[in-house]
Image: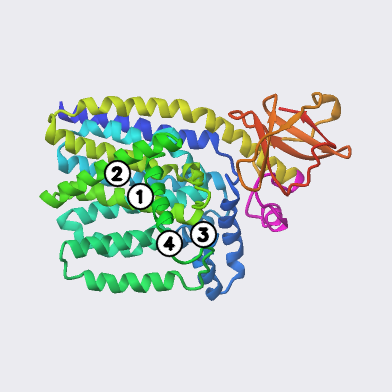
Amino acid sequence: MKNLQKGLIWAACSFVILAHFYRLSTYLINFPNWGDDFMYFRYVVDLPLLSWTDIWHRSFEFHGNIHRIPLSRIISAAYFYVGHEFNFKTLTILANGFMVILIYPLYQFIKKSQLGYWQLIPIIGLLFAPNGNLDNYALIGVLTHTASMAFLLVVCYWISQAQTRNLGIWISLAYPLVITDGLTFLLLVLLLLIYQKDSKFWIYGIFTGIIFTLYFQGYQSAHASGISFNQLFFILQGAIIFIGGAVRHHYWTSLLFGSLMLIQTLILLYKYHVSKDGHYLFISLAAFQIMAVGALITIGRGDADAGDIGVLFAERFLIYGTVFIVLIYLGLLQLGQQYFSKQTAYLAVPALLWIVVSWNAAIPKLENLHQRLIVDASNALVFNLNTMYEFKDREVNSLKHAGAYQFPNNLLKIQSTDKLSENVVLTAMPNFEKGIKEFEVNGEGTLLVTQNNKAFCFLHINSLSHSVKMKEDLPINIEKSSFSLIR
């Protein structure tokens, strides 16, 4: 009977996981989700032309003057040299294997805490909740953010267990190879060693200092040095809103839920202080690291003077909130088991409701993403441009002439004038994104822009906002152009 129950549990979990990969396969196409994804393509195409010294520099150079991400670059190179072709869709799906790695520490946690194997169903459901996984549809997102979360949870679990504690401590030093987030984790581990009065703290501290020094070689900060009290408060507020944004992308709602999540994390940290139970350490250490990531994003991308923290709600950071939701659920299981009842089935009800809501919220976004990718690929193939991000001759030549990429089939084509609908009117909207213009459109599908009686580009109509967006430097004269609905 127990074997049958376990089989049913793993069958249900497998269904959730396979559904995630099915959605990836359905909604992605072989084209970058965003301009950052081109970095990997340019990297692998350039490698044969570089010396070993140049390969080293290209692998470890800063991306966007923020991150060193050598692990993700190395993974993309390994993929390219095995397949001899660069397929953005295939590599993104393969890189989602990091989501599967995340299951390992969660399974071990459930197993050691004796919460019941059936709890794996809501836990894996929360982890793979569709709306919380939109970051995993971008190549840079899954190779950096999701890889970071996989590294974090595995290492936190190892550190929390006596048998693997030393392994986790020393492996954590490699975290900055994944993403900049790893630097804050080194500080958290150092503080933990000092708290635990571990004699190795000074050795770990020396390695941490060396890593920080090497990491910031050649770094040029765009921010003034020094932090005022107002800026410190802004950063703390950003860390709280970052985790609360996992519930809803709204300032006051995220601040409320983020504060409740922080309180629970502090309770779990106190429980670890009293009991030295590794389960509490696992949850609280990982949770504080994610909050530290929110603080870093606030420092790097927020505007303290204007009080603008909208970047914390970007889809590119959703996986952090998803993992935090899972940690909150694990914490509730631990506290509920201790203070209320050994039977924690009641906690699965809101978790399952969350999964259903997430599914309903994600599908329209994924359908919109799929259509936007088709328009982006069509613009690249037909017009040698992109309407939202930088797309220059280097990208055009790499895609069309490097011999390493093939455009998807069934892209948009320029239609004859007799097949076009009547002109569609664009109404200017307030600009909420820096460098982006937005226009309201009465219609659905794709617009063909014509200038001087010549087709210029395609514009994707966002099916959620019923608008089109374009970068400000896109040379379109709205008054003198015509916009026809083609699809």
Q: Amino acid at mark 3?
A: Ala
77 and 54: which is toward the camera:
54
Residue 150 in sight here: no
Q: Amino acid at mark 2?
A: Leu
The residue beneath circle 3 is 77
Q: Position of residue 276 (x, y in %)?
A: 13, 52
Which colour scheme appears in the figure?
rainbow
Q: Is residue 405 magenta?
A: yes
- The residue positioned 49% from the left and 52% from the top of the image is 304
Q: Position of residue 71 (x, y in %)?
A: 44, 60
Q: Position of residue 255 (x, y in %)?
A: 38, 39
The residue beneath circle 4 is 227
Q: Which element is circle 2 on? A: helix
Asked whether the residues under the numbered discs 2 and 1 touch, taking CB atoms below 8 Å apart as contact, a structural biologist would say yes
The residue beneath circle 1 is 291
Q: Which element is circle 4 on? A: loop
Question: Could you say which quadrant of the image residue 188 lies in?
Answer: bottom left
Q: Considering only order in the chain, which callout, 2 or 3, is on the residue closer to the N terminus? A: 3
Instruction: Assign the C terminus to one quadrant of the image.
Output: top right
Q: Which mark is residue 262?
A: 2
Q: What range of the chain is rendered magenta?
A: 383-406
Above or below 282: residue 43: below
379 and 180: which is toward the camera:
180
Distance CA(mark 1)–CA(mark 4): 18 Å
Q: Amino acid at mark 1?
A: Met
Disc nearest the viewer among 3 and 1 = 1
Query: Mark 1, residues whose alpha carbon is within 10 Å: few (<14), some, or many (≥20)?
Result: many
Q: Locate residue 205 relative to residue 360 in the image: left or right.
A: left
Distance CA(mark 4)–CA(mark 3): 39 Å
- The residue positioned 61% from the left and 64% from the top of the image is 46
